[in-house]
Every structure is written in structure tokens, then in C-alpha cells.
Amino acid sequence: MSTKPDTAKSDALLVTILKSLDDMKAEDVVQIDLRGMSEMGDYMIICSGRSSRQVAAIAQNLVTDVKAAHRRNAKLEGKSAGDWVLVDTGDIIVHVFRPEVREFYQLEKMWLSPEEQAERGMPTGPSTHDPSAE
């Protein structure tokens, strides 16, 4: 069974991204396969940094690593605030959050089935966010 060239490129890029996130001590890394679910990319990665400074550093290091390994420019959004930084590499979208912001938006719940959430030890009930408490 052969792998499509685009899939092979996405998979190689995925390896680079996961290594970069590990090198920068990103926490709670979740990889979501979007192939067949969305046209926005092949994978989505969601991870956390402990502080705004670490979130920004993780994202900037990721952009540098992707460019060095794949000669590909990645788009970076939200770095100045450091609460939620989105890195768009074309085939893979990476969301780097501070933990509180990640809990608020709960992107994993939007993209993972209840079964996948349970496998990852995530609560599968309704959102724990209560807008009336703000």
C-alpha cells in the first residue's frame, strides 16, 4: 500500500511539529486527524504552555523549526497576547493555549467524538464553562 505524496509530506511535517512541541515542553499535546473531516488541513494539534511567555515561545520556535526542516513559512496569529496562538503551516493547524484559555474554548470537544474523548480521559458531558458566572 503506497502513501499519497501529500499525505507523506503532512506526516513528515507532523513529526517535525511534535518534536518541536516536545523540545519546548508543550503540555497536554492532542493530535486530531482531520483528513476526511475538514478541508482546512490534515491535522490539528492542540497544546498548552504554562504562561503567556511560554505559549509565545512555543509558537515562535515551531515556526522556526518548520521553516528550517521543510522550507515552509507558517502563519502566526495571536503571539502578542500569548493566551492563544494559532500556527498555520498549511497542512497542519497548531493551537497553543494557556491552560485557562484552552479550558474555556474546549476545541477538543468540537473535533473529537465522545468515544475519542473518553479514550483520552476527557470529560464527555456538557461544557464545564458557565457564561452566567462571568
Image: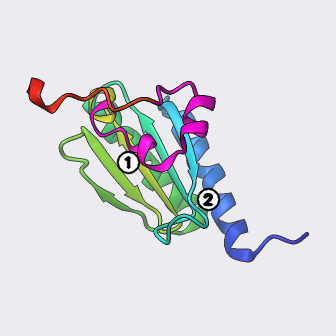
In this picture, residue 65 sits left or right of residue 84: right
**What residue type is disc 1 on?**
Gln
> Quadrant of the rendered structure where residue 34 is?
bottom right
Quick one: 114 or 32, which is closer to the camera? 114
- Relative image position of residue 68 (x, y in whole percent): 54, 59
Tell me if mark 1 has few (under 14), some (14-19) or many (20+) residues whose alpha carbon lies within 10 angstroms of its own.
Answer: some
In this picture, residue 81 sits left or right of residue 75: left
Q: Residue at x 38, y 30 (%)?
A: 49
For marks 1 and 2 on the same chain, the one whose residue lies earlier in the sequence:
2
The residue wearing badge 1 is 60
The residue wearing badge 2 is 13
Question: For the residue labelled by badge 1, is the local secondary structure a helix, a strand or a loop?
Answer: helix
Looking at the picture, does residue 24 appear above or below residue 44? Answer: above
Q: Which residues are magenta?
A: 103-124
Looking at the picture, does residue 73 appear above or below residue 33? Answer: below
Q: Give yes or no for residue 29 being in the magenta stretch.
A: no
Outermost front residue: 125
- Relative image position of residue 58 (x, y in whole percent): 41, 40
In this picture, residue 45 sits left or right of residue 86: right
Looking at the picture, does residue 34 appear above or below residue 98? Answer: below
Quick one: 119 or 35, which is closer to the camera? 119
Q: What is the count of numbered marks?
A: 2
Quick one: 114 or 74, which is closer to the camera? 114
- Principal SS element in the magenta part? helix
**What residue type is disc 2 on?**
Leu
